[in-house]
Amino acid sequence: MMEAMCAESVVDGLDPEQAAAVLAPRGPVCVLAGAGTGKTRTITRRIAHLVSTGHVKASQVLAVTFTARAAGEMRSRLRELGIGGDGTQVQARTFHAAALRQLRYFWPQVVGDTPWQLLDRKFAAVSQAAHRCGFATDTDTVRDLLSEIEWAKGTLIAPEDYPAAAARARRTPPADPERVARVYSTYETLKVRSGEGMYLDFDDLLLHTAAALEDNAAVAEEFRDRYRCFVVDEYQDVTPLQQRVLDAWLGDRDDLTVVGDANQTIYSFTGASPKYLLDFSRRFPDATVVRLERDYRSTPQVVDLANRVIGAARGRIAGTRLELVGQRPPGPEPTFAEFDDEPAEAQAVAKAVAKLMGKGVPASEIAVLYRINAQSEVYEQAFTEAGIPYQVRGGEGFFQRAEVRQAVNALRQVAARDDLPEDADRGSNLLSLVRASLVPLGLSDTEPDGAQARERWASLVALVQLTEELLEHEPELTLEMLLRELAARAEARQPPTVQGVTLASLHAAKGLEWDAVFLVGLTDGTLPISHVLGDKETPPDQAGVEEERRLLYVGVTRARVHLQLSWALSRTQGGRRSRRRSRFLHGLVPDSSPASKIAEPASSKKKRPQCRICGKPLLGTTATMLGRCEGCPSNLDENLLVALKEWRRERSKEMKVPAYVVFSDNTLVAIAEQQPRDDRALVKIPGIGAKKLEQYGADVLALVRGERTVDTLDI
């Protein structure tokens, strides 16, 4: 048996807050740990302290996290601390690995002789269910259906409840929710093999484990005698199903330590919810809560930018934000860069990377991070041309993606035809031919619903744009020449898998860090992604927008020293410069930065509206609507706003339409701030055209002038 570690040794080298978390008394402990604040070090020291002081044996501790890599790191650090020297060790596993181990042990007691097998690859079963329900079974459709099923099971939603739940959660399923529910139900049926047992997927492991403990007292007693202390890492990413398993593990006990950061909640689309972290003190009123805010990863300059990014957040999560304090020596200020087009942006990033490498920064300590995987193509090309080694993390290289390979094969089949009209495959006609060839694979004029369908669509759009770019340099480009170019690029892009610059999506970068990070493609419609921004018919998904902001925050906090944020006004070289930098960058770009100048679209002759407070050009829909920068002071008439909202509520009720159809919240705020006194002033507020002026103008102006109250209006 190992000798107990004294309190001084277990907290050696820790800061006061980390030490407080380590030495907290047994019982519920919540560690709110910001990015780079040493959370893994803290929780492993806490486990070591609990074991070494005799509170619990190492074998009675169950620590769960979300990746096998994180679980392995936890086990390694515990071994370094001498935990497990007596032959026992802490069980540090993912939720699913822990449930699998437990279910295999308890299954005979709970179910009996009925055999089961783990369905670790669900694609074929979901494809079969989709086929039975009349769906296409292409890869992206099946993957999107699979994502919906996993979300539903992770949030404890049965097939029959899926349509209503999907509507409440503002999901964008790949088909009518009722049809998706049928696929879900059919999939569940297919897993039960008559007379042959059943298949269990990973979510079923959690469901059956929870049920075994909830419904069988003997099983619960044996389990709870075996495990007495629980630690959960990344607690902001727990799903309702995982929380149910954790509750079943705990029973009526409270020896639980959770660690998380609501500001890094970026997996809501999978069913993850920060509410369990945010409500921890309500559930356990006597809990010890420790905030880790000393950032040991990044320079104070990077930390300051991260704080400003998340400082603009709204909603409940924003109310619990951590204010990071950089502990490293000062470094360079983050830089911002605006480019005319994506190829120019990628080439400039490649040049900056080469410069850093020339100064001694290893390629493996540099990352280029983007919102969606399809954005990697232009960087793969730029790095290949510059001779910079790279590796794509969290996804295949552009030319290895299934949809790109299918697209190239489709173009080869077209090239093999002998019935093409003359010149249909060259010059200005080539682009139309490429577009037509890719339509059956998912190319469309508008972005589709469903995450996988959007990724496929973005890759196909990138192929079309590559064709456009090649045509600009070679107006007589033929289909054969295009195919040779694509083949050459695919062959050339076989970078080493080690010691290369990392290309990764922001989601894939979670939990990682580099000396230098380039955050690229930061435009509205990409970050935040377009489907959360709404349109003329649908209001923005504010929760979705805030999650996108947190993605940017995660990206910023990946950088230790060097950080560049950039965006391009056009997708293709020489294209129309119609994009705008991300709304999340408003107020962050220093006036001294060359990128602080707001570029106008080449096709626009109109002067951008200016802030009525400071006179600067207005950026973003909200600022334009309000007529002032979001950071400028407001002269809001609170009483008028209340009256306007009550009037809108009554009007929408009478018309049987959602309130936003009458006027959006921003429009009402703009009215309450600007207090227009006549029709001319009222229609100057964006969102109020001739039709709405005719419908609502008299009522609104009467409220503004104080001539009427809501009760006296003719509604």
Image (cartoon, rainbow, N blue to C red):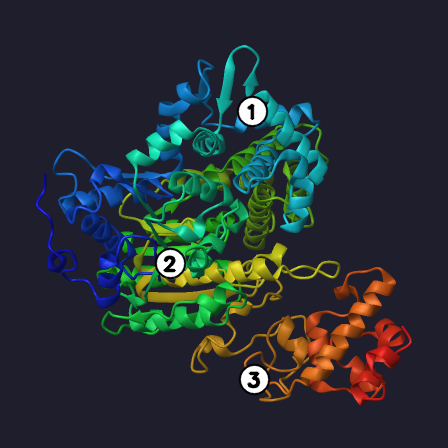
Residue at x 43% of width, y 63% of height: 553
Q: Earlier in the sequence, mark 2 or mark 1?
A: 1
Total number of numbered discs in the rendering: 3
Mark in the foreground, 2 or 1: 1
Q: Position of residue 227 (x, y in %)?
A: 30, 37
Instruction: Check disc 3 and report its element: helix, strand or loop.
Output: loop
N-terminal-most mark, 2 or 3: 2
Q: Is residue 76 left or right of residue 606?
A: left
- The alpha-carbon separation of the residues under discs 2 and 1 comes to 43 Å
Residue type, label 2: Ala
Q: Identify residue type, mark 3.
A: Cys
Q: Residues within 10 Å of mark 2 (few under 14, many from 20)?
A: many
Label 2 sits on residue: 350
Report the side of 685 relative to 545 (left or right).
Answer: right
Query: Please, is residue 234 above or below residue 563 in the view?
Result: above
The quarter holding residue 331 reads: bottom left
Image location of residue 163, percent across then percent down: 69, 41
Residue receiving disc 1: 125
**Front in this rendered view, residue 57 or 524:** 57
Horizontal side, residue 33 vs residue 142: left or right: left
The numbered dot on residue 632 is: 3
Instruction: Report the amino acid beneath label 1.
Output: Ala
